[in-house]
Image: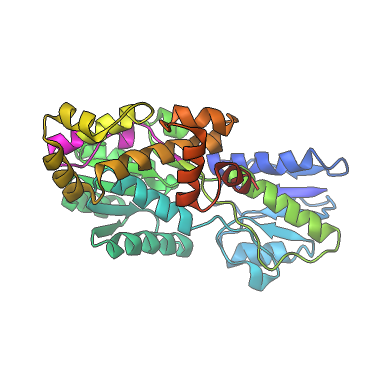
Amino acid sequence: MIGIQVDTSTGWGRKMLMGVFKYKSQQPNWDVWTSPKSFAEPQKLPYGVKFHGAIVYIGNEKQAESMARYGIPVINASVFDSEPFGIPNIPPDQEAPVELAFSFFRKRGYRHYAYCGPTHIPFIRSFAQKFKTRVETEGFNCKILNVSASELHKQLVKLPRPCALLAWTRTIYQLLVACHALNIRIPEDLAILAQDEDDILNQISSPPLSAIQVPAEQIGYAAARLLHLLLDGKKLPTKRKIPKPMDIIERQSTNTLAIEDGHIRAALHFILNNSHQSCSVNEIAAFTELSRRTLERRFQKFTGRTVAQEIQSVRLEKARSMLLTTELPVTDIAPLCGFSSTEYFIYVFRKHHLMTPGVYRKHDRG
């Protein structure tokens, strides 16, 4: 019997559970027990049932000590370092979502950033600091907000606008309430990106929330595979491959551009809407009613990139997303993303990602 104790109150926990059950479907001898629970509930397996192993979400030392007392193979699927307690873990990647979030906002022209989450929790404090450091490395400012009600209101009012905010999933709805109470417009004043996707709550919130697509299902599958090694008496690999976040799901909460220059904002919208077809610099200049030279100069000033670089970046990003979220062959993806030929697409993709599109797809899916 395998015990599963993860936070089923979140989309992350439910998707992780799906990954475990996908692995379980390939193991005819596995019986699995689980029960609905929240992040705050203690890790506890039911009395009287003989468990051979468990996959759990451990958030602190007390929970780690409790699981270690069972004396069975256990895999921890949280950021909390449970290795000192004899419990191997496969933590979610913290570096990749920081880079993904910053790049997402930077391409939209943001110069002011913030993070909102319960930073009294060590791993969330660590993540917030990583995001702040990444932002400040590029010469921009980043505020870490206190989530207590009174302090949150005060700090939201003081944020420079427009501002890009990355928020931990559990406090994002508290954040939305505060913004509505203060008449802070989303996304015009504050563009909000959820740190994790909840396929139900993020869509029904007001406004619907953009979110990082964390590979929770892959983490669940990987955790089950590691547990299987322990059950067979084998040693775990010293270096464990940690699935990285795949993409950002865009919804209304980030549907804007923080570019003061109306002509450059129009150019960016034109590129986003037309990158899949003929999209030359001259066409964009004509659309914005600027000379090519003026467009190039002002575009470089506000974005730090040339118009041609932006076109290619948007096309590559769309292609990358399609490789991860569809089963379309590379020969179909290339023209849908505006590349003149499959060969040229492969050349540009390999130059940027250091691997071909096909290898990238297989690498990401493990």
Q: Residue 267: x and y, percent?
A: 21, 34
Pick the front one: 184 or 24: 24
User: Is any part of residue 10 visible from this angle?
Assistant: no
Q: What's drawn in magenta, residue-wise?
A: 248-266
Q: Look at the image and say whether residue 255 sits in the magenta stretch.
A: yes
In the rendered image of this protein, does residue 218 appear above or below residue 290? below
Asked whether, in this view, residue 228 is left or right of residue 86, the answer is right
> 118 or 284, which lies in front?
284
* Lateral position of residue 321 relative to residue 207, left or right: right
Q: Position of residue 93 (x, y in %)?
A: 53, 56
Decide whether residue 123 is among the magenta residues: no
Looking at the image, what colour scheme do you see? rainbow
Percent coordinates x, y for residue 19 in the rendering:
67, 42
Q: Residue at the spot x=54%, y=34% of the render?
A: 325
Q: Residue furthest bottom?
A: 84
Nearer to me, 353 or 114? 353
Towards the viewer: 51 or 184: 184
Residue visible at 19% across and 44% down in the picture = 299
Query: Residue 117's x, y, as percent?
Result: 38, 53
Identified at 47% across, 39% down, the residue is: 344
Residue 357 can be seen in this image: yes
